[in-house]
């Protein structure tokens, strides 16, 4: 089966519902979470806290789905509903991340923050699209 044509990178939403304005926020959120997940994996901390990571994984999945939705043809999705739900997820991220990082003592939290900063500096903008159908740079 032939794959559908790949949308051009950063195609703004053609709808006038503010959906296109979400893209940079979603990309930034996904890169921040990717850096955190990789740091936790490198430090072998993710395995210790799978239940505590669940909310962050759910938010990351929401952001990936919203990035996918932004690339869909107009009229295929209820963009107003997607924007509302996505804005709620973006608003929940800072508290969810802070609550998760509060699980670590000061020394461990500092190590995590140091690793996150190093990893985030190495991420490419395209990494925000990992596991986004039609945009996943690991697949394309």
Image: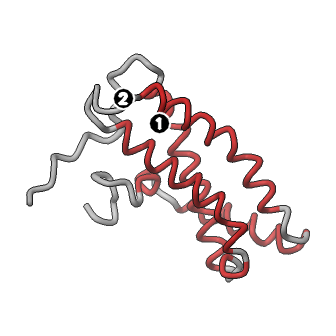
Which numbered dot is residue 97?
none
Is 130 in front, or is 122?
A: 130
- Residue 123 lies left or right of residue 76; in this view the side is right
What residue is shown at x 27% (from left), y 52% (from top)? Answer: 134
Which numbered dot is residue 12?
2
Q: Position of residue 114 (x, y in %)?
A: 74, 66
Q: Position of residue 33 (x, y in %)?
A: 60, 57
What residue is shown at x 73% (from left), y 55% (from top)? Answer: 97
Instruction: Using a 10 Å C-alpha cutoff, classify the residue at mark 1 as few (fewer than 14 neighbours), some (14 to 19) or many (20 or more).
Output: some
> Residue 23, relative to residue 117: is it above or below?
above
- Total numbered labels placed on residues in the image: 2
Is 124 in front, or is 25?
A: 25
Residue at disc 1, secondary structure = helix
Which residue appears farthest toward the right when viewing the image?
Answer: 106
Q: Position of residue 9 (x, y in %)?
A: 32, 41
Is 47 in front, or is 116?
A: 47
State the image quarter where residue 77 is shown.
top left
What residue is shown at x 47% (from left), y 34% (from top)? Answer: 82
Mark 1 or mark 2, which is nearer the start of the sequence?
2
Q: State which quarter of the image contains the N terminus.
A: bottom left
Separation of marks 2 and 1 at Cα, in angstroms: 8 Å
> Residue 4, relative to residue 57: is it above or below?
above
- Residue 71 lies left or right of residue 109; in this view the side is left
Q: Position of residue 24 (x, y in %)?
A: 51, 37
Which residue appears farthest toward the top when viewing the image?
Answer: 16
Residue at disc 2, secondary structure = loop
Which numbered dot is residue 23?
1
What residue is shown at x 47% (from left), y 36% (from top)? Answer: 23
* Label pair 2/1, CB-CB below 8 angstroms: yes
């Amino acid at each position: 089966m032939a794959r559908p044509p790949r949308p051009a990178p950063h195609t703004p939403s053609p709808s006038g519902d503010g959906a296109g304005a979400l893209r940079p926020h979603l990309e930034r959120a996904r890169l921040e979470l990717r850096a955190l997940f990789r740091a936790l994996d490198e430090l072998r901390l993710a395995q210790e806290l799978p239940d505590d990571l669940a909310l962050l994984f759910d938010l990351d999945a929401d952001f990936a789905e919203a990035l996918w939705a932004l690339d869909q043809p107009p009229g295929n999705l209820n963009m107003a509903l997607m924007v509302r739900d996505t804005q709620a997820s973006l608003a929940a991220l800072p508290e969810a991340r802070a609550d998760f990082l509060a699980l670590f003592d000061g020394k461990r939290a500092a190590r995590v923050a140091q690793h996150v900063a190093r990893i985030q500096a190495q991420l490419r903008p395209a990494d925000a699209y990992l596991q986004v159908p039609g945009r996943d740079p690991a697949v394309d």
